[in-house]
Image (cartoon, helix red, strand yellow):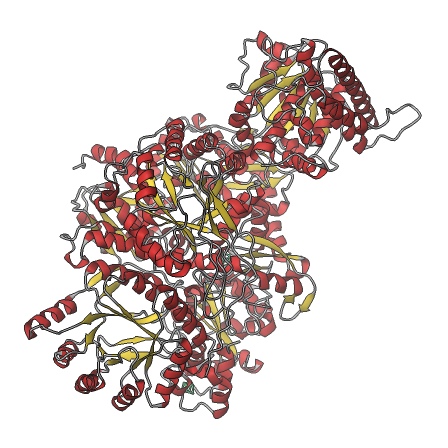
Amino acid sequence: MSLDLKPKKWAGALREVTLGAGSRRPVAVGGGNGLPLHTFEAAFPHRPALALEITDVDPVRWVESVRQPWEGVLGRPAEAARRAVADFGADLLLVHLMGTHTDRGNRSPEQAAADVGAVLEAVNVPLIVKGPGAGQKQNTVLARVAEDCRGEGLALHSATNEDYKTLAAVAVAYGHALVGESPIDVNMAKQLNILLADSNVDLNRVLIDPLTGGLGYGLEYSYSVMERIRLAALGGDAMLNCPIVCLVGEEAWKAKEAKVPADKEPLWGSQRERGIHWEVATAMTLIEAGAEVVVLRHPETLDRIRKQLDSWFGSEPSHDREGVVQNSFRATDEHR
Amino acid sequence: MSRIIASAAIRGGHACVRRAETMLAEALGRHNRNTAIGFPSTAYALPIILALTGKRVEKLGDLEEAVGAARSWLPAEPTEKLWLPYLGGALDAGAATLVAQEAIEALKPLHGIPLEFDYWLGPTTDGILREQGIKLVDGRMPGFAACVGALPDDETAEQLARDLQERNLLVFMGANCAGETMAAQLNRRGVQMNWETFLVPYGPDTSSIVHALGFACRAAFTFGGLKPGGLEETREILLYNQRRVFAFVLALGEVDDEKYATAAGAINFGFPVIADTDIPEILPSGICTYEHVVSNVAHRDMPARAVEVRGVKIHTVEIPIPVRHGPAFEGERVRREEVAIEFGGKYTRCFEYLASRPMDQVQDGLIRVVGPEIGDVPEGARLPLAIFVEVAGRKMQPEFESILERHIHSFLSEPMGVMHLGQRDTVWLRISKKARDAGFRIEHLGTVLLHKLRNDFPAIVDKVQVTLFTESAGVEELYPTAAAAYQSRDERMGALTDERVEIFYSCALCQSYAPNHVCIITPERLGLCGAYNWLDGKAAYEINPHGGNLPVRKGDSVDPVLGQWKGINDFIRNASNGAFERFSAYSMITDPMTSCGCFECIACILPGTGGIMIVDREYAGETPVGMTFSSLAEMTGGGQQTPGFIGIGTIYALSRKFISADGGLARLVWTTTRIKQKLGDRLRQRCEELGKPGFYEKIADETVCTELEPLIEYLATVEHPALEMGEMV
Amino acid sequence: MPLTGLQIFKLLPNTNCKKCGYPTCLTFAMKLAAGKEALEKCPDASPEAKAALGAASAPPIRGVTVGRGDRAITVGEETVFFRHEKTFVRHPGLFQIFDPAGLTAAERDAKLDHWRAIRIERAGETFQVDGIAVVETAESVAAAVAASDRGFPVAILAATLPGATAIAERIKEHRPLLVPPAGANLEGYAALAARLGIPLVVGAPDLASLADAARDAARAGVTDILLEPPGADPRLLHHSLSAIRRGALDRIHPGLGHPVFLCVGAGEIEKAVLGITKFASLVALADCGGETWLPLWTLRQNIYTDPQKPLQMDPGLYAIGEPNDRSPLLVTSNFSLTYFIVSTEAEASGVACHLAVVDAEGLSVLTAWSAGKFSGDRVAKALREMKAAERVSHHTVIIPGYVPVISGELEDALGDGWHVLVGPQEASDIAPFFRDVWGPLARDLGTHP
Ligand code: SF4
Ligand code: SF4
């Protein structure tokens, strides 16, 4: 008896968003026309991109095991960026300007722009630039960064339903992409995209951040919301078909389980491995649910996830030394 | 379109174009065609010309084409005999004027006329545009005022500037009136004019006003991502300005032909003109959001009137009251021993009444206390109080009165030291001694309402005025009006039937956890959570058209008994992501509404009785169907259509449309005592309306039984009408 | 289009005889419609009903129980592809792979005892090792018996038919799961499973032969079957898992309507993640450390939470750090996510405190409040039950910034001497709140440590 497994065909597909321009070697994401990783029945022009997070100031709250691979470069964004790309092989970087937060150093927009400028000097991968969190300070910081780095195709993180106008305007003005962040809610994500489109932002330059719940801390919400966003996109909803970015590292390493040392909880096993597993499990699960850009903290996680993805997308590096993007591939499965 | 304005504008246009042509010819005579031309530090060449013609003017020679285009747009100059000006002609002349004026400004340096001198700043650089223009786009700055001409005296000029500044508006100044300019007037008063103070003088000639409009165009290019090009692009740029850049022109002093022409140019951008002189008005007709030209406005009213006409929404960040405020103080109590003054409760008459008024009958920001203030009475005094709020708004509808009025409670709970309970005429309000000592007065209740209403409901509220009556005479005089309004609102709500409206509202708020669920809210069926009725849906849509509530047109009737309409079915198919094809408003058996999970109650059929039961969320016990509320909820929830089971808002049971396709309320055989209590007399009354004597008493509850067999016996004993109606399935 | 509960109800006798175990036919019909019951349970169902219900009379994925007694585990009975469509019902069992070769009896027992003792509480669930997958070697009979004796469900990772037979015979009362070696001829194993009435794993190199093999095993009399999907690499495994679930729900082949079994080697946590998220029902793990198990247990807990019934914490007073009677007292709802976020941030603030978790039926604070589950009265009652008054001397309670509206009612309900402080809306603001608001206040009250 043969199996009659019909490939699922969908009316819609994800938008293809290119990150990085100007002096960046661009990385494109999205564009797939099927459920995540369903390469056996759909075509995916790009593999999910893997980013590492670097910070403008020493991230004192990072736990030792995730600080360790970054030893010597924490709080030195240009050096960290070099290490992230050259040694760890990140496809792109998220520069977290945490030091601009009023409670964490209150660095000025000028300093922030200088930090991002230094990272742009140091590496040629695309950057996601994350501000200190929605509000006036974030707007002035990111507006300044956007202006000083015009034409580099940064992804500004992030516009929200309550506060999107400034970032929408500067993204348009200076040729950047924009991350729209909504609180684990399909309708809010859609509403924000409508608002962005209404502000003349090209949705082909927008990523959705549906807010990541780390493993054990709301992962299931992100998981289902992302699956639903993907289904809506495949159903043809032009307001929900932007690729999704997940800030996995930040959420995974926030978990108590990633931080408690083994001597405090003997049953929990090695802290170092546990933390990495926490990040790996969060990342893998969210990629299954539709993440197209995953931001990680530990290089070992990046390595492990990359090896997994190679199984679907071939083991070619996502970019070669000449700077040509080679992450495109076509489904090659016995059932196609 | 007024003939006078149109004729003047066209005449002015011709004059301007002629002047530009002359200056251009002169310049070409003296300079090479390739002579660079343009404003300093901008990448947008001559922005108005770029926006309106799609052409970059960088060399002197390029101007020929631009001025030629302006010439070609000009309609024939009207003569006494030939009368055909229409709005379009005047607008074309306006556009031609702006192009000509920009050419003139650009040519000035070649003629040795400086653009920047004394306090005149001349054209704005891109650097400043980037810093300031974004504020216009992202809403930090509500808009700009282009002040054309001069005021009768220096003092009035300063007053106007201050009034505009206070509203956070950017003030551009240009042109003169018989040599006098507003900038010169401010300068004599020692007022600082620069980009920091938001007072920007462009130049003394009328043509300098193009720099203000050029600024708007460049904001559209930069932050709106708009590209110059053909006609379509030009239209986009003008529309962008109309929708997003809240600017207006203040015509100060005599308006000559060129000013009319410039004003016509501004109207192309959707920027209306407010004049202090008695020029003809142009009322709403399409380009601007509301009126195009409003005249004869007193100087002190100009900012308010302009803001209103342009539809500028001003958001107050800090509400000016002397105590802290915010949702954090919402549930706070003011205890008896802390009371400085008290209203209502069981002691005095205290009510709140919000009424909508025509735009011209509300003086925005007016707050009056009629009667004693807090300092005029002894500590702990009890006074009567009427909180009388009058609002006006372009989109305000009398139906929204009750919704806004309901918000008074949360607004007045927000200042620290104010306790507000109840609504309508059951209000109880206390102000604490601490608040009073900090300077809080009765008047500040009005301040809070004013700002909150404007901030939270910008879509429907444009103007607010509040009167607080604190002596019996005023309170008693107003009360009958308020009481009548309460009653008529209730009656209106009662008379609002599904048949009488063409539009229902959807609610998709619960899709966050029940992905395919949509509530269809009709006048006679509220959302199943019990929190949203039809009016709420309507108001929510007006306030936020991209939110969770959308209007759904009923369309053709598919089945009047079941309550199916084509429009609703189409909507449901879409909104449920294709999961459901049809929706019956009045049946729980055939294509019933989906249930998300936050229903107040579940109604479910009881085979064997011919009836249904309704069980509420709080009820933890067994029910005759053999399931507790929570297992019922599991069956019913999740956004599925589950024939025989629906989640409902409790008071839906009182509706004439309650499962009317299945037999209606007469089917109710069992419910909980809690529901009986909650619905109380209203349920009795509804039962009586059914014309089945003693029906209410026949409805069983958990005190009668919680299982099916005894229920059937009971129903037989009391001869419940459902038994005769036959099984529902 | 599946039949609705009401349509099924019309096919039932409507006698409410309760023989199916449900009080009314309607209830039973609803369970059938939800794919949670099989029509067989109603002895009086007419042949017409059976015919009409057809395929729908049995769940699309059969349930399989491994083991007996308290720790027996039932898997399968899933009805959806996406968890948001309804919910995933039977969480996968995680089995520890155990190779007893070369161990003394004492060493073996020590390991088994250790595994049996593992209990980790998280958000109302107790994580434990669900079963032991015994690798067949010379020592395996004794090991399988030892595991069964400890109550563990056992999977037999067979190497040879005779060897497997020996083990299975000994513990057949405990319903072990028989896992034939890769590529084995299944006939003998099927006969053994059928004879002993125990569940069997069938595997095959591709999906079509897998489905056929399962159908053949069923014909050979095996009632409980699990499928081992082709999965040489992550992509193929993901494909197989997705296709099996979709094929089962679409009922394209009777051989696909079974739960899935997965073996995960050492250092392959990614494979286990894929299995747990994508429909595997029993996963046998070679790794045995908490660093592997804890993430997987947690992942399973997340994925198998009913999307409409959020995870709940047990209400009570939780200590963050080592609080004393002068430490701040916070209240929050028992929605696990809220609890986790609040406790994580409170912990990160470095200020020891008491966290009162109030039963709000697992709703978030604001939702709970609007549903009347987080009213001042309810919170006061909960605080009294927790004897909060004895735990803090300052009698000040900090409520979430989203519900200032309960402050007055709560203060009234708590009675004299109590003071309500409105905390921040977002948990991330707890640290600044402790610093800027609580700190000075506590100093004023003279209660600061
Ligand atoms: S239950 Fe209430 S909130 Fe939910 S969708 Fe219906 S009306 Fe909206
Ligand atoms: S056994 Fe059958 S007839 Fe009896 S109650 Fe259950 S479904 Fe109804």
**Which is nearer the eye, A150 or C70?**
A150
> Could you tell me if residue C79 is visible in this image?
no
Q: Is B699 on the left-hand or right-hand side of C347?
A: right
Q: Position of residue B51 (x, y in %)?
A: 67, 31
| x, y percent for residue B156 | 62, 14
Query: Foreground: B587 or B165?
Result: B165
Residue C4, image x and y in percent?
Answer: 50, 77
* Residue B108 vertical position relative to residue B470 in the rendered view, above or below: above
User: Is residue B214 shown above or below B672?
Assistant: above
Q: Residue furthest front?
A: A322
The residue furthest right is B81
Camera-nearest residue between A20 and C74: A20
Give the mark count: 0
Q: Is residue A250 visible?
A: yes
Towards the viewer: B130 or B203: B130
Residue B10 place in picture, x, y as percent: 81, 24
Residue at screen point 40% across, 58% down: A314
Q: Which quadrant of the figure has residue C439?
A: top left
Q: Quadrant of the C terminus of chain C?
A: top left
Task: Identify whether C99 is placed above or below A247.
Answer: below
Residue A290 shown left or right of residue C353 in the figure = right
Left or right placement of residue A174 versus residue A76 in this view: right
